[in-house]
């Protein structure tokens, strides 16, 4: 049974003091995020006098973190060693790889960022929203390029994902490369891998891979993932099949490559496009700016003039395919969209899978749309969506190309990391060469690259969160309180004590929210008042001095116990003692 947490206990332990110093010529790797979760990816490589940070993502709040906007990787380890940081290398522009940047770079001494062009523009635009934060120097690198960052060469290679300019990298230590793939899948046709992938991975014929860290998101899915070109083919068929209908397509703004394809088809089949969703517009503007999206000026039209065109000439691109309450699709479903009223002849294509946890809102969304008559197409019935992460067979293929000596799975829940570790062993890695990391794990490759060690110590890993624009370390106690508040409610008792007379001045006041309906619980409240009176007066009888803290503690414990007995609930109980 959960018990109310009475106060925040501030942890004073200096977590960093226990970490042993780095020995010369040891390659140290830290997984600060993205290993017990999907999101807030951050990996750190440390060698002699240099530190390289790879990715700096955030994670959106989860069910067990109410009131929190984003969750960040804990960067305390880096703050304590900021003079060693040579750069932050960003693999691609998704927020689970870039989102933390404006919140952390100032505290890390504003290190330079290294990334490819598309990501660079996205990051610059993001910093523009944070005028109070210093924008780091951004160095644009390209696939195939090798540059020196700090004392070591770093080589980049292009990868297939869902956003332009995704890349992996190799930090070349004297004992072999530290290979980090970033988010990755393969382009293929029925499992026959395309030549461009062979070309990319041909660098591993010459690059000795000391250790690889690789995306584990979908490794537990069998076979091959649906390649994005299949999704494009499906969309072209949809444009042909529904040539007389108004099309409404719901997808993620992060699916930049798909959205570009949809725009091209729209133009090819003579339709205008209305884009609903700020992040989608931002990403498309970058794609246009960099020449990834070549469309005529008037293909995109504002929503308010869409009604001037016949249904067959219009596509709505909308966000909210996960059932998000305020996004465009839900507003259409709720009949509160300013410009779109759904009708039977419409076709709604949900071009996304259902993120675990969103099953209910997505179901609601589909039900509400269905009630208004449109046809609905989802990934379950057609290939209108593909994940950006490779399945099991792609994972095996990549392992066989890179052939690392050691392996650390990352980017995934712990179970996925475990599945990925098994895959690595299947391609021949001995068990002792594979390390399963946790948040804050410190892993060292010692003795000139001959053995890998998972240290028992962890880098500081107290949850770091953003609320509004403020970054703070949040104690789990605070989150536990918020959960209790949400689930069990709050119960405040105000006892006003007349010190001179040694008794309650009046009947205690009770305030309660989210726990019981006070008007209908008069009997229970009467019992609580009686209990308060009993406790206070017996306390006052027993001692000459009034010890407020003691009274409060006893009130808290007794009331909490009583409420639990009577209601089987554990609201947060707050006793307030006023002396008059
Ligand atoms: Zn990604
Ligand atoms: Zn990712």
Image (spheres, rainbow, N blue to C red):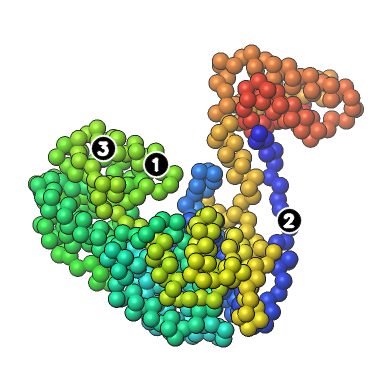
Q: Position of residue 278 (x, y in %)?
A: 32, 54
User: Which of marks 2 and 1 precedes in the sequence?
Assistant: 2
The answer to whether residue 17 shows anywhere in this view is yes
Of 439 and 556, the residue lying toward us: 439
Of 153 and 552, the residue lying toward us: 153
Q: Secondary structure at mark 3?
A: helix
Q: Position of residue 411 (x, y in %)?
A: 49, 61
Quadrant location of the C terminus in the rendered image: top right
The reply to whether dot 1 and dot 3 touch (C-beta < 8 Å) is no
| Residue 186 placement, left or right of 477 | left
Q: Position of residue 363 (x, y in %)?
A: 34, 38
Q: Say if disc 2 is inside 8 Å of ligand 2.
A: no
The reply to whether dot 1 and dot 2 touch (C-beta < 8 Å) is no
Residue plotted at (66% across, 31% down):
573
Residue plotted at (63% across, 76% down):
451
Residue at the disc numbered 1: 359
Quarter of the rendering containing residue 406: bottom right
Residue at the disc numbered 3: 369
Residue at the disc numbered 2: 12
Q: Nearer the viewer, mark 3 or mark 2?
A: 3
Q: CA distance from mark 3 to mark 2?
A: 53 Å
Q: CA distance from mark 1 to mark 2?
A: 41 Å
User: Which of marks 2 and 3 precedes in the sequence?
Assistant: 2
Q: Position of residue 145 (x, y in %)?
A: 40, 83
Quarter of the rendering containing residue 528: top right
């Amino acid at each position: 049974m959960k018990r109310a947490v009475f106060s925040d206990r501030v942890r004073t332990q200096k977590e960093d003091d226990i970490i042993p110093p780095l020995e010369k010529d040891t390659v140290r790797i830290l997984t600060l995020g993205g290993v017990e979760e999907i999101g807030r990816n951050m990996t750190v490589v440390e060698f002699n006098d240099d530190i390289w940070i790879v990715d700096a993502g955030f994670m959106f709040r989860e069910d067990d973190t109410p009131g929190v906007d984003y969750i960040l990787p804990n960067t305390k380890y880096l703050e304590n060693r900021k003079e060693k940081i040579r750069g932050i290398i960003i693999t691609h522009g998704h927020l689970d790889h870039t989102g933390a940047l404006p919140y952390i770079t100032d505290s890390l001494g504003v290190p330079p960022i290294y990334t490819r062009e598309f990501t660079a523009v996205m990051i610059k635009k993001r910093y523009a929203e944070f005028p109070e934060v210093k924008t780091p120097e951004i160095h644009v690198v390209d696939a195939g390029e090798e540059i020196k960052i700090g004392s070591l060469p770093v080589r980049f290679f292009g990868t297939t994902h869902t956003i332009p300019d995704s890349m992996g990298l190799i930090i070349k230590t004297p004992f072999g490369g530290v290979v980090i793939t970033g988010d990755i899948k393969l382009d293929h046709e029925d499992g026959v891998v395309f030549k461009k992938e062979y070309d990319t991975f041909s660098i591993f014929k010459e690059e000795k891979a000391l250790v690889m860290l690789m995306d584990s998101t979908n490794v537990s899915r069998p076979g091959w993932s649906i390649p994005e070109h299949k999704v494009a083919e499906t969309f072209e068929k949809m444009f042909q099949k529904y040539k007389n209908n108004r099309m409404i397509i719901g997808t993620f703004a992060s699916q930049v490559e798909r959205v570009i394809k949809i725009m091209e088809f729209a133009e090819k089949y003579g339709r205008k496009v209305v884009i609903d969703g700020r992040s989608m517009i931002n990403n498309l503007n970058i794609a246009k700016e960099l020449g990834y999206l070549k469309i005529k000026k008037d293909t995109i039209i504002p929503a308010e003039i869409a009604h001037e065109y016949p249904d067959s000439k219009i596509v709505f691109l909308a966000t909210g395919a996960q059932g998000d309450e305020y996004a465009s699709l839900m507003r259409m479903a709720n009949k509160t969209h300013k410009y779109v009223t759904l009708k039977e002849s419409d076709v709604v294509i949900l071009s996304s899978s259902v993120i675990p946890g969103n099953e209910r809102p997505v179901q609601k969304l589909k039900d509400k749309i269905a009630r208004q008559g449109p046809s609905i197409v989802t990934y379950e019935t057609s290939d209108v969506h593909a994940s950006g992460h490779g399945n099991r067979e792609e994972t095996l293929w990549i392992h066989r190309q890179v052939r690392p000596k050691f392996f650390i799975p990352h980017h995934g829940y712990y179970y996925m990391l475990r599945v990925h570790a098994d895959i690595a062993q299947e391609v021949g890695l001995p068990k002792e060469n594979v390390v399963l990391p946790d948040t804050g794990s410190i892993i060292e490759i010692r003795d000139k690259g001959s053995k890998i060690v998972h240290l028992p110590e962890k880098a500081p890993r107290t949850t770091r969160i953003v609320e509004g624009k403020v970054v703070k370390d949040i104690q789990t106690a605070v989150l536990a309180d918020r959960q209790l508040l949400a689930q069990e409610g709050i119960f405040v008792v105000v006892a006003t004590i007349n010190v001179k007379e040694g008794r309650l001045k009046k009947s205690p006041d009770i305030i309660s929210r989210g726990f019981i309906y006070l008007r209908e619980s008069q009997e229970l409240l009467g019992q609580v008042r009686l209990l308060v009176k009993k406790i206070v007066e017996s306390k006052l009888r027993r001692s000459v001095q009034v010890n407020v803290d003691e009274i409060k503690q006893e009130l808290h414990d007794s009331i909490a116990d009583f409420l639990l007995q009577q209601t089987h609930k554990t609201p947060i109980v707050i006793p307030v003692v006023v002396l008059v």
